[in-house]
Image (cartoon, rainbow, N blue to C red):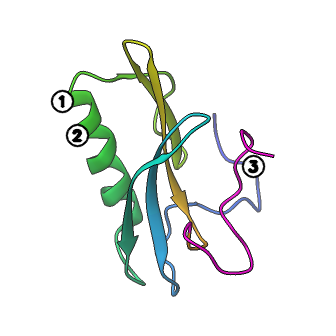
Amino acid sequence: MPRRRGQMDPFLPSRHTQWLLVCVVGGAVVSKTVLAPDADLRRAFLDAVKSHREDGWTLENEPTYPCVFLYRSAERRMVTLCQVDPDGGPLRHFSPWTG
């Protein structure tokens, strides 16, 4: 799907720290990686997706945007880029699975 006029590429380098977050859907954080300012966000994200695929995970959607869902057996995971520290601060990572 082509981008609409005015939409930003979510993989553009940022001047701010970002996090690559892998979590169980509806559950705990599996891993988080701090990405330094100006890091190659696309490469970091695609490397995480590739690593999961090589470990036998199946993608549910294409990694066109920085959020994919994967499954293996009965476990389902989400891999995403996060602009706020998932460990704290006044703004926590949004999770639609917790209240």
Q: Which residue is mark 1?
A: 54
- Asked if disc 3 and disc 1 are in contact, CB closer than 8 Å, the reply is no
Q: Which residues are magenta?
A: 86-99
Compared with 95, 91 (above or below) is: below
- What's under tag 1, amino acid-wise? Glu
- Asked if disc 3 and disc 2 are in contact, CB closer than 8 Å, the reply is no
Nearer to us in this view, 27 or 35: 27
How crowded pointer 2 is (Cα within 10 Å; few <14, some 14-19, many 20+) is rated as few
Q: Which residue is mark 3?
A: 4
Compared with 15, 8 (above or below) is: above
- What's under tag 2, amino acid-wise? Ser
Nearer to us in this view, 80 or 10: 80
The image position of residue 47, as x and y in percent, is 26, 49
Element class at badge 3:
loop
- Asked if disc 1 and disc 2 are in contact, CB closer than 8 Å, the reply is yes
Tell me which residue sits at (42%, 84%) in the image: 37
- What's under tag 3, amino acid-wise? Arg
The image position of residue 58, as x and y in percent, is 36, 20
Element class at badge 1:
helix
Q: How far apart are the alpha carbons under marks 3 and 2?
A: 31 Å
